[in-house]
Amino acid sequence: MMATPRWRSQLIALAMLSGACALLQAAEAPNDALIRALQTAGLCNPGAPCEPSEDNRLRLQRYTESTEQWAPVPAQVLTDGAVPSDAIVLFDGRDLEQWVNTKDHQPAGWIVRDGVLTVNKTVGNIETRRQFRNYQLHLEWRIPEGITGSGQARGNSGLFLAGTGPGDAGYELQILDSWNNSTYVNGQAASVYKQAAPLVNAARPPGQWQTYDVVWTAPTFVADGTLKTPAYVTVLHNGVLVQNHTQLSGETLYIGKPTYHPYDQAPIKLQAHGDKSAPISFRNIWVRELP
Ligand code: MG
């Protein structure tokens, strides 16, 4: 058997020694980390050595925990189904129990067939029985295949985020065929009507279902009716962000500049637009009230 050369034994001894040093350093690392954390938090007394003592460790723990919030615990929302467990279902394909006609608050009078709600242009706008302030809303809509017309006269409808009065009074998120249809950009699908064009055009072709996911922050007013905080809306169209916390200048108008009119709570309204194109359809509408 060949003897290990002297230089080789020395090398091995050196390697073992450096390994031991690394182990020693690793053993000391928690204290170093503690000292660093104490210094970062400003918990060491100025001018005195920063000791990794048990007292200091407890001080650091108390300081760390002082920024933890434990209450109120967020309510649990189950999302196993298509609709979050705390949502109010406004249309699930069965009936229009949650809706009334805007004009006279009588039964809504739109058409429900095969789980789908279709606009009935002869009876006008419909709105929810309930009133809302701030909310998250999901809604699906479909422009019929073979839609005719152009510009604003092609599959026009609308989601009024707050229906503040008769007719088209309120804040309209536009619904329109914007697949291949030129119009003013602050009047195309997913625009805040005549106030804010969508960031991009995420429209699908006629015949396909499309989604709106909306977060609506209602305006607030002081006692004398003047505006306290404006309305904001965030919208995802087919999962794509198209309105990003957009600030509104007031109610949406066809003619004139938007202005605010005080209200507290309002129904959500769907538009029966008077254009001659075929009526559009809706399905799967739900809302979650927000603080
Ligand atoms: Mg419209």
Image: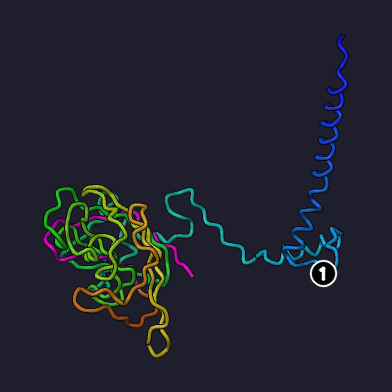
Q: Which residue is mark 1?
A: 45
Residue 85 or 169: which is nearer the viewer?
Answer: 169
Please report the residue visible at 37 percent of the width from the left and 87 percent of the height from the top.
225
Residue 183 or 121: which is nearer the viewer?
Answer: 183
Please report the residue visible at 39 percent of the width from the left and 77 percent of the height from the top.
230
Is residue 22 within the magenta segment? no
Q: Label 1 crowding class (10 Å Cα cut-off): few <14, some 14-19, many 20+?
A: few
Relative to 198, residue 2 above or below: above
Please report the residue visible at 21 percent of the width from the left and 78 percent of the height from the top.
256
| Start-end of magenta stretch | 267-291
Residue 33 pos. (x, y %): 76, 54
Query: Looking at the picture, which amino acid does disc 1 mark?
Result: Asn
Left or right: 113 as drawn, with respect to 289:
left
Q: Quadrant of residue 100?
A: bottom left
Residue 207 pos. (x, y %): 22, 47
Q: Quadrant of the N terminus?
A: top right
Residue 232 pos. (x, y %): 39, 70
Identify the element where label 1 is drawn: loop
Residue 276 or 89: which is nearer the viewer?
Answer: 276
Q: Quadrant of ligand 1?
A: bottom left
Residue 29 pos. (x, y %): 79, 48
Instruction: Specify whether residue 109 is in view.
Output: no
Is residue 277 within the magenta segment? yes
